[in-house]
Structure formats: C-alpha cells, structure tokens
Image (spheres, rainbow, N blue to C red):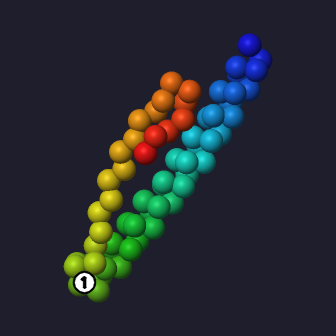
Amino acid sequence: QCLTIENLEAKCDELQKKIDELKNQCDNLVKQQQQLQQNGNFSEIESTTWKGTILKDGSINQ
C-alpha cells in the first residue's frame, strides 16, 4: 500500500508540474495578446486548444 501511495504522490507531482507549465504558457499568451492589442495588431493573435484524456494509469494523452 505504501508503494501505491508513493506512486500517487509521484503522479500528483508530475501533474502539478504540467499544470504549472500550462499556466505559464497561458500567462505568456495573455501577455502576448495584450501587447498585440496595445499595438493594434490583431492579425497575429493565435488560438490554441488543448484536448487530452487521462488514462487509467494516470498519464495524460494529448
């Protein structure tokens, strides 16, 4: 059972790192969009949609 808890803790750490990475990406895109809006240049705004599924082993499929 300890091994299972350790595995879950490791997976939680991995997921938290991924969440932090995605949050940073989102923050950077928001800053980029704000800069483009200030410059009046709307043609360069890009949109990205992420779709994924969480598998039974806890991994993320993108």
User: Does 57 appear above or below 22?
Assistant: above
Q: Residue furthest bottom?
A: 39
Tell me the residue at 55%/48% (across/down).
18
In this image, 4 relative to 60: left or right?
right
Q: Residues within 10 Å of mark 1 (few under 14, many from 20)?
A: few
Decide if residue 48 is on the left or right side of residue 19.
left
Give residue 33's quadrant in the image. bottom left
Q: Nearer the viewer, residue 35 or 13?
A: 13
Query: Total marks drawn?
Result: 1
The amino acid beneath tag 1 is Asn
Q: Residue furthest right?
A: 2
Q: Position of residue 27 (x, y in %)?
A: 45, 63
* Rendered view: 40 above or below 14: below
In the image shown, does 49 or 24 lie closer to the viewer? Answer: 49
Taking depth in this image into account, of 38 and 19 the one nearest to the observer is 19
Q: Looking at the rendering, in which quadrant would you find the N terminus?
A: top right
Asked which secondary structure carries label 1, the reply is loop
Vertically, is 55 above or below 42? above
- Residue name at image x 71 percent, y 21 percent: 5
For residue 41, side relative to residue 10 (left or right): left
Which quadrant would the C terminus be assigned to in this image?
top left
Left-right relation of 5 to 59: right
Residue at label 1?
A: 41
Depicted 14 relative to depicted 26: above or below:
above
Q: What residue lies at 69% left-to-right and 34% top-to-bottom? A: 10
Q: Position of residue 51 (x, y in %)?
A: 35, 45
Residue at figure coordinates x 59%, y 43% from the top left: 16
Place of residue 8 in the rendered image (x, y in percent of width and height, measured from the top left): 65, 27
Q: Quadrant of residue 45?
A: bottom left
